[in-house]
Image: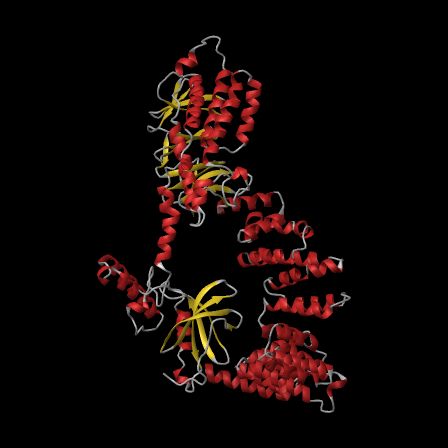
Amino acid sequence: MGTPIVPLKLVAGDRIKDQFEVKKKLGEGACGQVFLVDMLQAKGKAAMKAEPFMKNKEYEVLKMEVFALKKLQHSRHVCRLLGSGKTDKFTYLVMSLLGKEIDDIRKRMPQRRISAPSTIRIFIQLVKALQDIHEAGFVHRDVKPSNMAVPYIRLGRTASPQKIRIRLLTTTVIPAMTYGCETWTSKEADTKRLQRAVSNMFEIAGCDPPDMEKQVLRRKLKWAGHVSRMKYDRWAKIVSEWDPRGSARPRGSPPKRWADDITDSIKIFIHNEALRGNLGHGRRRIGILRKKEHGPLSEGIVQLGAAWFAVSRMETEVEPHKYHKILEKPNIGWIGVNPSTQKVEFATNDGVFFDLTSNSELFKISNFDEIDVHFVKNRHVILVDNSLLYIDSNRVSQDAVSILTRDSDILLIDFENKLRFVDLETAKTTEDVRDVEAGCDLVACSSESANVILQAARGNLETIQPRKYVLAHARALLDRKDYIAAFKWMKKHRVDMSLAMKYKGGELENDVDVWLKSTNDSQLLEQLIISCTEVFDEEGTSLCTAVYSYIKSIEDVERKTILFPLMLTSLLRSKPSRINDALKEIQEHVEKIEVRKDVFTRNNLHHISFFVPAKDLFNCALSTYDLKLAQQVAEASNYDPKEYLPVLNTLNRVSSTLERHYRINVVREAWVDAISSLFVLDSSEERGEDEEMWWNDAKEIIQREGIYQNALTLLTPDQKRYKGCCELYAGELERKVHWKQAALFYELAANSEKTLKCWEMARDVDGLVSSARRLGVDPVKLKIHAIKISAALKEVYG
């Protein structure tokens, strides 16, 4: 171990960068000292290893540990790295605080040995930990029990098993042991009263009443789950004294005791005794009850009430005792009203469904003790107590725990705790599958929203929004042309906003004025533009053009300023990107703003830098020939000052405006623009005394870059450098042995000698004669070239 420059001295209460406070020293090793610290910001305890600065830097190894830990954070077998850094005296790293090592645990075991199964599990986790280390490129050279901890083998220490045992005991074992105390049992009088009430109702219907003890047990188990989730310091009071009606209800607790639901069911039944005497009141009361949420027992009473109400309305004058005889069957397990036909239906425990009016068999399913029946589009969706799911007589699932229906969808939770969707028409499961918490029940859902309400095993209600219904709700908002609400909905649920263009097509572009008038949220609409252009090229560019045109036409300067980033985004996301137009828009709009012009320019240039690389943006800014704007662009895009400041300083020293334009185009490597500037400079009064200087520069660029044709398009035949460009191009064509084309351009340059020479090399007598006539060549010279052509042709063809 090396010699420290200053010995490390940390005492309780010392703070490290206002993030960690030292509590005590835990130990010391060859690589430094270890302290217990409090995390001041994240709240909690951690372990900090500190190493003083050494006189020989080779002995400082803590920074290597930090490097290794960072590369191993993906492994669950390695301590979490919570922070690292250095002060003026030492280097430190902070990691998760662990508990006793396996070596200490072994010493406390009987016979100082760990059982064989535990040893195997520890060894398996040790091998996985070493595998993670080796895959990261390291070798662990200090594998020993004192460097391992449970429940997962980590390179360090872990949470105390003793605390885990205490929590399991106080939150699970003890509540289960106290299950038989008075708090957990219902009053016998309540159970008997409920049994008598339900028996009276079923006696009217001619059916056997259900067993109320099962109903009571079901509620007891739900309440047991609620108590089991309590923290260990609350369970005793909750079990023995929980009666919130005398005081405020604890936060997170159900509003009533489990037995209160039974009491409410009794009250509902007694109140509905009026059904037999007052049909009008009964009809109204049934409607009210259907809108309220009650437990399963309450729903059963309401369903029986509806069935009795439907039976009482039937015409019984012909056969007054017909329905009573039918309902005297001993094995009736369900009775209800089909809302589509308004007829009473019942089912027997052997799985046969009947129409009460005709006493005809409808269909048959498997035997059951209890069933849950939903009516959807005159179809029966049936969940049997053995987890079988039927659509009428067709079995579609055998692992359904809980179901709901919405439109033509059947929502079900299976044994694997997955929420699945079954199509009513095809009876097939769709691809949308979602994991849910173990023990959840489906409670409610609405076709008007994407919400699906679940009840967890511990009693709390949770709302989820399946992707399928999120997309359906977004499409419904788009159909209503409530575009901004649709965009916000898609943003909230992380739906790609290109869905709007995919679903609405060109209608989205046609309604640009609709959704732009209804909001000033530029960021929301920018996300729409970006998403659409990522998926659609032509349609996205067309949408960008429509948005740009609309914002450009806004006369209100303040509102246009708010939407200005959106206009820039629409220009930059077009294909091709219109960077120069975006810079010009900034230049034009900044003149209309009265205050904070620099802030506006800086913010919008920074906005452009998100879409365009710094160098390309700087070159585009130079193309405006505004050096101040170019400097603002470079600063806003974090361009390296070493690259742009010397260039701008050199350009600012050029006094001639035309020459500055030429120099800027050279910096941009925009060679066509450069020779265009040279032609303008060459024909102006700023060209100087040397008339050939700028023309020589132009010739050098044209020949080096090979832009002969571009140069010719910049000039007209009456300009003085036109013939020079023609001669340059003719020379290039002559070098490539394109004799005829070279002869034509030499003729445009009025170079008769080279024109005739090229026609001669092309062996084209007609071209030679035509050019000679146009150029007014002496007939003697023409004859000489004609003779040479004739001799060459004779030599070739004999």
Along the line of sight, the residue nearer the viewer: 745 or 692: 692
Along the line of sight, the residue nearer the viewer: 795 or 640: 640
* Residue 439 on image: x %, y %: 40, 43
In the displayed structure image, the side of residue 342 where residue 650 appears, left or right: right
* Residue 230 on image: x %, y %: 44, 47
Residue 769 visible? The answer is no
Residue 531 visible? The answer is yes
The extreme bottom residue here reads: 689
Taking 476 as reference, is 340 above or below it?
above
Which color mode does the image show? secondary structure
Q: In which quarter of the image is residue 529?
A: bottom right
Q: Quadrant of residue 217?
A: top left
Along the line of sight, the residue nearer the viewer: 541 or 96: 96
Quadrant of image for the N terminus: bottom left
Taking 772 as reference, is 589 above or below it?
above
Taking 582 as reference, is 627 above or below it?
below
Q: Quadrant of residue 715?
A: bottom right
Q: Which residue is drawn at 65% across and 73% down?
A: 633
Quadrant of image for the C terminus: bottom left
* Residue 474 on image: x %, y %: 56, 46
Number of callouts: 0
Taking 245 as reference, is 210 above or below it?
above
In the displayed structure image, the side of residue 83 where residue 615 appears, left or right: right
* Residue 413 on image: x %, y %: 41, 41
In the displayed structure image, the side of residue 159 where residue 106 appears, left or right: left
